[in-house]
Image (cartoon, grey):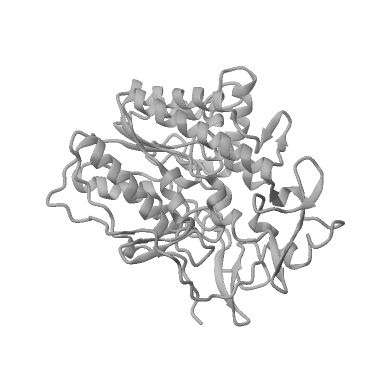
Amino acid sequence: MKKILTISCIAAALIACRKTDFTPASVSPGSANFTTYVAVGNSLTEGYMDDGLSAYGQGHSYPSILAQQMKLADPSMAFLQPMVTGNGSGYIHLAYVNGQIDPINATDSTYVNPTGPDPSWANWGTTLQGTFVNNMGISGIRLTDCVSDGGLEKSINWVVCSQNPFGRFMNFGNLGVPIQYIDHIRSSKATFFTCWLGDNDVLGYALNGGVSSSPFPGVTLNNITTPAEFAQKYDSVLTAFHNIGAQGICMTIPNVTSIPYFNTVPTFVLVNGVRKYFYIQTGNGSVRLATNNDYILLPAYDSVTAGCGTTIGRPIPNDLVLDAAEADSVAVATVQYNNSIKSLAAQFGYGVVDMYTYLQEFQTSETIDGISFSRTFIQGGTFGLDGIHPTARGYADVANQIILEINSKYGATIPQVDITKYNAEIFPNF
């Protein structure tokens, strides 16, 4: 997917202006025990950035940033993140091509590609199995993959987890004796944790336009986890941490349709000042004109610019559209997930960072330490080139939100990071 974009100045309306307090009079953990900090979650936790896992992204993951601040209060703590080498899996980068800024995929051979996969990526992680790591984030993992009720589901979860290249650093046993993700939580001896599991239980469905896939026999991906199953499995995760005496912070699930992936390609074009909506194929197979309640996905950019969607006979395909009914399913599930997260965290006495509410602010613009953040693709500073995952600056802001909750919940005085020292998108030299 190649998206040719011109870079222009944006005048964004400010809805708030915040100043980060990163110089407390003294630094203290309060009642929090940071001896063994463990982060559980998916790509947002692992440090995935610009559609890839690289050493740069991992070095700026929110757990890594958070750990360096915790260490100011407890210098004896150690934090091990399973690092890739260099480019890792490869990632999208910006290039200046023919007078325009062009996002170049890691696999794009059209131009000289400095961000393709590192040669070591094919076997990355295998030598780390059996080594305790503090960042247990695995890109692509769902909450439902982390816990099983036994039987066939346990085997299915083993297939999903063991075949995930982003989780190769973790030992999942074998099909006969599978080791679950939650088993690693139980054996972690964590004294403190952050939990940002659950995004992919609805995000996978949304990213694929509501279309499910079956990569292996008996395995269905990209469906929405039922709220009842979500609550049961989230309870299991928190129970595991509670049983080893860990303190912790939980994060709610963002409104996934608010990110650039769903808001960059418009549902219409202006022709002589009149909106001409695109034709889309919906989840039920029908073809109709798009509305403002539908979302055309970022990967549809090339198809739309090539004329797809302009006639009823050539609609934008279902897997490139999250139609209104599908978007409603996403919204309903997300609210129910978050109700469970808040309720269960309260039962166990854990803190909560409401990322759903916080990230909603970036739908327009938010000014933090003199820097404007928004959800605008590339220029907004918050999200990277895949339109889904944060930039280094975005991850730093996530870490700051967690620090605020730690300080409030546990009486700590952990300093926030100076986000002006973290990059948004890195633009090429002209």
In the rendered image, the residue lying farthest to the left is 25
Q: Quadrant of the N terminus?
A: bottom right
Whole-percent x, y for residue 31 in the image:
19, 33
Whole-percent x, y for residue 27 in the image:
16, 47
Whole-percent x, y for residue 417 in the image:
28, 56
Q: Say if 269 sits above or below 257 in the image.
A: below
| Image quarter of residue 314 | bottom right
Side (left or right) of 379 relative to 272:
left
Give whichever of 199, 192 is nearer the camera. Answer: 199
Whole-percent x, y for residue 150 in the image:
58, 18
Residue 34 in view = no
In the rendered image, the residue lying farthest to the right is 313
Residue 417 in view = yes
Give whichever of 362, 144 is nearer the camera. Answer: 362
Side (left or right) of 13 relative to 4:
left
Q: Say if 130 sits above or below 152 in the image.
A: below
Name the residue located 32 percent from the left edge and 66 percent from the top edge: 370
| Image quarter of residue 51 | bottom right
Q: Say if 404 sits above or below 376 in the image.
A: above
Q: Say if 231 sits above or below 353 in the image.
A: above
Give whichever of 72, 208 is nearer the camera. Answer: 208
Q: How many marks?
A: 0
Give whichever of 154, 17 is nearer the camera. Answer: 17
Side (left or right) of 218 relative to 424:
right
